[in-house]
Image: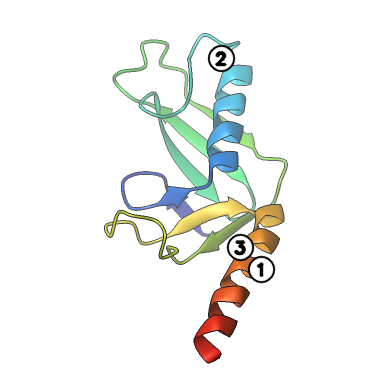
Amino acid sequence: MYKYGLGGHIAISGSVHRSLNDVVGRITKNQVSGWEGNYEIILCLDGQINACATEQNTRGLNFQSTLTEKLVFLPTPEWVQNSEQNGYICFYYELEGFMRKWWKEYARHLG
C-alpha cells in the first residue's frame, strides 16, 4: 500500500479536494469547514483516507475513511504552476479528459 501525504509537494484535482471536504463534513457533522488547514491527510492508492487534526482544528477529531472513486497518482502536469510539487492526484474518471488534451499536444509536436 503506497501512501501520499497531502501538503505543499502534491497537487490535487478540484474533484478530489471537494470530495475530501465532503468526507470531513460528513465525519464531523459539518462542525469543521473542510480538510485544508484542519487536517493532515494521507491518501492511499486504494482510496483510504487517514486524517489527523492539526492544531488549528479545535475539534481534534482524527478519523479514517474511504473515497468512493478510484484515485490516480501522476507526475505533476506542466500546467501546475508550483515547481515544488512533484505529484498530482486525481480521480480515474478525470483521466480521460487529461489524456485527450495530452494526446492533442503530443500530436501537435509531431507535426
User: What x and y, as percent, mark residue 20?
Assistant: 56, 33
**What amino acid is found at the position of numbered circle 3 in the picture?**
Phe
109, 71: nearer the viewer: 109
Q: CA distance from mark 3 to mark 2?
A: 33 Å
Q: Identify the disc placed on residue 13.
A: none
**What amino acid is found at the position of numbered circle 2 in the picture?**
Thr
Label 2 environment density (alpha carbons within 10 Å; few <14, some 14–19, many ≥20): some
**What amino acid is found at the position of numbered circle 1 in the picture?**
Arg
Q: Secondary structure at mark 1?
A: helix
Residue furthest to the bottom: 111
Q: Residue at x 42, y 50 (%)?
A: 11
Observer-side mark, 3 or 2, equals: 3
Say if mark 1 contacts mark 3, CB within 8 Å. yes
Q: Identify the disc placed on residue 100.
A: 1
Q: CA distance from mark 1 to mark 3?
A: 5 Å
Tell me which colouring the rendered structure shows: rainbow
User: What x and y, as percent, mark residue 78?
Assistant: 40, 65
Residue hosting label 3: 98
Q: Residue at x 72, y 41 (%)?
A: 68
Q: CA distance from mark 1 to mark 2?
A: 38 Å
Residue 78 is left or right of residue 94, and the answer is: left
Q: Secondary structure at mark 2?
A: loop
Q: Earlier in the sequence, mark 3 or mark 2?
A: 2
User: What x and y, as percent, mark residue 1?
Assistant: 56, 59
Say if mark 3 contacts mark 2, CB within 8 Å. no
Residue hosting label 2: 28
Q: Earlier in the sequence, mark 1 or mark 2?
A: 2
Label 3 environment density (alpha carbons within 10 Å; few <14, some 14–19, many ≥20): few
Q: Secondary structure at mark 3?
A: helix
Residue 9 is left or right of residue 5, and the answer is: left
Numbered disc total: 3
Q: Residue at x 60, y 10 (%)?
A: 29
